[in-house]
Image (cartoon, helix red, strand yellow):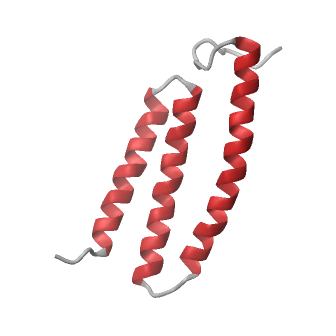
């Protein structure tokens, strides 16, 4: 059995759905952040799959830049979460009603 484009798109849709479900259901900032990263990786998988099956490297080049931007996003996002935890002693979105000091 050959792995076709449909298989990659199904896996990507499942990963994106799991990430979306994680963002909607979780109230912990770290879990929400991980779910957002899962959604981003699902989009990257779709880009690589289309790039591979169209014999064009543009999608893979775009994924390379997306991963570089995601690394910066992770560093900034985790720094904000750590700073928020140090100030409020929680990462639950229910306990953080406003961002006032």
Q: Quick check: 67 left or right of 16?
A: right
The extreme left residue here reads 1
- Quadrant position of the C terminus in the picture: top right
Residue 74 in which image quadrant: top right
Total number of numbered discs in the rendering? 0
Q: Quick check: 98 left or right of 36?
A: right
Residue 89 in which image quadrant: top right
Instruction: Kindly identify the residue that appears in the image at 58 percent across and 18 percent down.
Output: 92
Instruction: Kindly identify the residue that appears in the image at 58 percent across and 80 percent down.
Output: 58
Image coords of residue 5 (percent x, y): 32, 74
- 23 is higher (above) or lower (below) than 63: above
The extreme bottom residue here reads 55
Image coords of residue 72 (percent x, y): 72, 51
Instruction: Kindly identify the residue that appears in the image at 51 percent across and 62 percent down.
Output: 44
- 3 is higher (above) or lower (below) than 42: below
- Quadrant position of the N terminus in the picture: bottom left
Instruction: Kindly identify the residue that appears in the image at 46 percent across and 88 percent down.
Output: 55
Image coords of residue 43 (percent x, y): 49, 59
Image coords of residue 6 (percent x, y): 29, 69
């Amino acid at each position: 059995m050959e792995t076709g484009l449909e298989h990659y798109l199904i896996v990507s849709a499942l990963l994106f759905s799991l990430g979306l479900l994680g963002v909607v259901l979780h109230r912990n900032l770290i879990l929400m952040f991980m779910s957002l990263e899962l959604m981003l990786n699902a989009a990257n998988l779709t880009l690589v799959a289309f790039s591979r099956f169209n014999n064009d490297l543009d999608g893979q080049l775009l994924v390379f830049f997306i991963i570089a931007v995601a690394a910066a996003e992770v560093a900034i996002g985790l720094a904000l979460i750590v700073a928020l935890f140090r100030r409020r002693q929680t990462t639950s979105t229910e306990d953080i009603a406003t961002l006032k000091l």
